Amino acid sequence: MAQKLEPVCYTGPHVRNCEKAKAKLLELNPGFNVFIYWSIAQSPSTRGMRDCVQGTFESKFGDRWYTKTWTYNYFVFQEGTIIWDGSRSNQNLCITDSNYERVGKVDRANWMGQLRGLLGTERQSKLYLSSLALPSTHDSHATAGNIKSIVRYTGLGDCQAVGVKEQLEMGVRCFDLRIGVGLHLRHGLVPLSGYLRDVLNVMSQFLDAHPSETIMFQAKRDQNGAPGAESAPHEVRELVRSYPRGQVLDAQPTLADCIGKMVLYHDGGVGAWKPCESDGVRPTGQGRNDLEERWDQVQKHLEWVTTNRKIDDGLWWTVSCAAETISRWNTESKLKVVIGLVEITRPFAFANYLIPLTLDWLVHHRGQGTLGRVELDFASDQIVHEILLWNFDYFLSLGCT
């Protein structure tokens, strides 16, 4: 049975005090989940709780002139669901840092299987893959270690910190691969180590170990690929079909149709169906060095998609939270390219700016509509985790239990 805190009053900033309380509760209850909240308007409801206890603690903060003590509530539970409509505002405060979860622990390597169990067989047969919020990486193979030229030292060519295998284990399920002649992997002007088959082998082995999952990917002929790559569509399709887990379809699959499959999709390259973009807010690459402008585009895109999408529309939407960098260089003079190498904002700088803002937006709007593919540079555990939680919150709000 879970253990409560002894009566205690922590002194200091309230957020820090809540973190202290959480650390103590986890020390007392290893392997359990902790949910701490303060609300003057509402309390969370629970569903399917096991080994659950509730309690309170006090938090005192102020100076010699004014001190205020707040009482915080907490749940400690091993399994179950917290239904909570609050946020991290002063009126409805939830403190659990990045480990706040409505559905206990999300198994990142098997999260789609976990979600399938929540949805049930019948609902899966009626929902398209695009109904989910899918963590997606931009230029997924473009890590510094895969760049075999001096470009690796400029910070321009790498868009991810870890490889595809680590991204899969993190929870990423949608991948952006760029190819040239012979299906050699590349990032624009920059050749990368390995071939498309190498990445497909990684994906296939992951699905062998996690058969409840689905992987989406594009194998896009990069616009800066060498001449002669026009044969890529046929080569890619034949290669994908050579894998027992490979899937090339004429239309988007339902969740029931793609269990344990790696699905080729179309995004300006080759594949089955073409994803849609939300009208009027597609990031354009204009002002590509302006971080604030880029966030404004991303935020408008998030708001449009969650407001206008329908779960059963069958359309595939992309929210691009990645950088717009060297995509237009092939149309510019060599002098402009050299100047751009000095002046352009690196993908890592975009990620450092965009990911915290996107994470905060997702936390405060969690489960309010469907997102589609959320594309990231330098995907991190924290933001991928938040995208996964969006799925569970959204479907729980629809009454899936």
Image: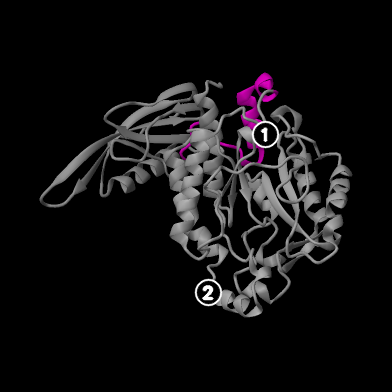
Q: Is residue 120 above or below residue 237?
A: above
> Residue 269: horizontal and vertical position, in percent?
75, 51
Residue situated in front as seen by the camera: 138 or 307: 307
* Residue under label 1: 129
Q: Is residue 172 above or below residue 5?
A: below
Q: Is residue 167 above or below residue 190?
A: above
Considering the whole magenta stretch, tell me its main secondary structure.
helix
Upstream in the sequence, badge 1 or badge 2?
A: 1
Which residue is depicted at the point 61% across and 69% down?
A: 156
Residue 28 figure quarter: top left
Magenta range is: 100-125
Query: Which amino acid type is marked by label 1?
Result: Leu
> Residue 220: horizontal and vertical position, in percent?
75, 54
The quarter of the picture where the C terminus appears is: top right
Query: Which amino acid type is marked by label 2?
Result: Glu
Which callout, 1 or 2, points to the residue nearer the camera? 2
Residue situated in front as seen by the camera: 252 or 113: 252
Left/right placement of residue 218 relative to residue 106 reads right
What is the crowding at mark 1: few (fewer than 14 residues within 10 Å), some, or many (at least 20)?
many
> Residue 292: horizontal and vertical position, in percent?
43, 59
Residue 204 figure quarter: top right
